[in-house]
Amino acid sequence: MALPVEVLLGIYLGLLTGIVPAFVAGSLGFLVRYFTGVTLPGFGVVVLALSIASVQGGLLGLVEPTIAQSPRLLVAVLVVLMLALYAHNQGDKLGAELPRHLSFTSIRQRTLSADVVELVGNMGQVTVRPTGEIHDMEGYPPLSPALRRSLKNGSWRLPADLPLSELESRLEERLRTDHDLADIDVTIDERARAVITAAPPSGGLSKRIPDGRRAVSIATLVPTGLARGDEVSIRAGERTLSGTVLSARTEVDDEHAAAGDEPVDDGETPVPDGGDAEAGPTPAPESAAASAGGVGRVTVAVARRDVKALLEAETPRLVVRSRGTSREFEAFTLVKRAGHAIRRFTVGPSADADVRAAADVTVLAARRQGSETGGRRSGWVFAPGIERSLEPGDEVFVAGPRAATDEFVEAVAR
């Protein structure tokens, strides 16, 4: 028979006989590398492949006795060895790349797709949006339409370098805090799409009522800007009662919410003690925290003894009490109004050791390394005067005319 025909027959027999040795060599290469981290020697692969192929070759020899004296045997052996060595190399590579401890936890540590990540400065962020409908949590009452709409139209920015399981936990905590949800479950996929299952708030109003007080809803003229936490005086007939606003809702607020201009957290249903369950909820977003004003209903927390008088009043009137202003901000405002400035700086090492505050610049406080603080930089000395010159490393607050203060800081600060 011609040599080309023998070669072709040898390749055919090699492919036919080499399937089993290649499979065994690849499997052993993967298992040894995966569990021990050691590569199976190539000589061992050759011996194993020839041993398996010899068994199959002996069976073929029984069918065709002349195969052992033909060149096709050598070609078949070479094909078997090449298949076995290639399969062993691929199995060894797979064993090296596959994670050693594969578990459901590691599978959950998948991350976002790169094309949904937004670069903000040097940090990556992702905007997570709900997909589909907001589902009700089994065993809880259904969500209110307004709360369901608020969740469905919401979007939340989160760090993009976290695994999806951590993103889900953070979004759950944010939604639970923002909307006071009783329970929530969030699933986020690689495209930053969230499937949300939530339960409405429970006991939202009762948690905000101080001890010894009761919540009462009244229909009255609501001042513009009234929000939860405001202290008010309620004029009920001949009496003036004090209370704290728990929630406020007017017709204008309802119109804004219906038009979609104002995201509303309608998850709370205040049920006052002795009043009606009609006091509207207080929106969670800051932009919607204050009421637009007008005729509406307000839920206030009042002393227990004042509940009866408030409920018997026909036309209660609401007056918001001032909490006063911060004296610190008032002081800074007066300083700025007078054309003065307050600066904080650290005395530089190049400053003259004998430098002292100018006549029109006053040292308000200093944190020094000298005897005043026992060699420690832990305390401030207020109104230290000019009994000692400023030294390098001292932290100082100074005040004075803006130009003089800026000139002094520029000369002394580091």
Image (cartoon, grey):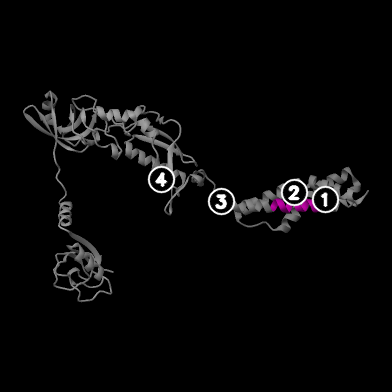
Q: For the stretch drawn in magenta, what is the main secondary structure?
A: helix
Q: Residues within 10 Å of mark 1 (few under 14, many from 20)?
A: many
Q: What residue did someone put label 3 on?
A: 100
Q: Amino acid at mark 2?
A: Pro
Q: Earlier in the sequence, mark 4 or mark 3?
A: 3
Looking at the picture, how far across and down is residue 310, in whole percent?
13, 27
Q: What residue did someone put label 4 on?
A: 158
Q: Earlier in the sequence, mark 4 or mark 1?
A: 1
Q: Look at the image and give the residue range highlighted in magenta.
A: 78-88
Disc 2 element: helix
| Mark in the foreground, 4 or 3 | 4
Q: Amino acid at mark 4?
A: Leu
Looking at the picture, how far across and down is residue 161, in whole percent?
45, 50
For the residues bearing labels 4 and 1, Cβ distance under 8 angstroms: no
Q: Earlier in the sequence, mark 3 or mark 1?
A: 1
Disc 4 element: strand
Looking at the picture, how far across and down is residue 369, in whole percent?
22, 70
Q: What residue did someone put label 1 on?
A: 76
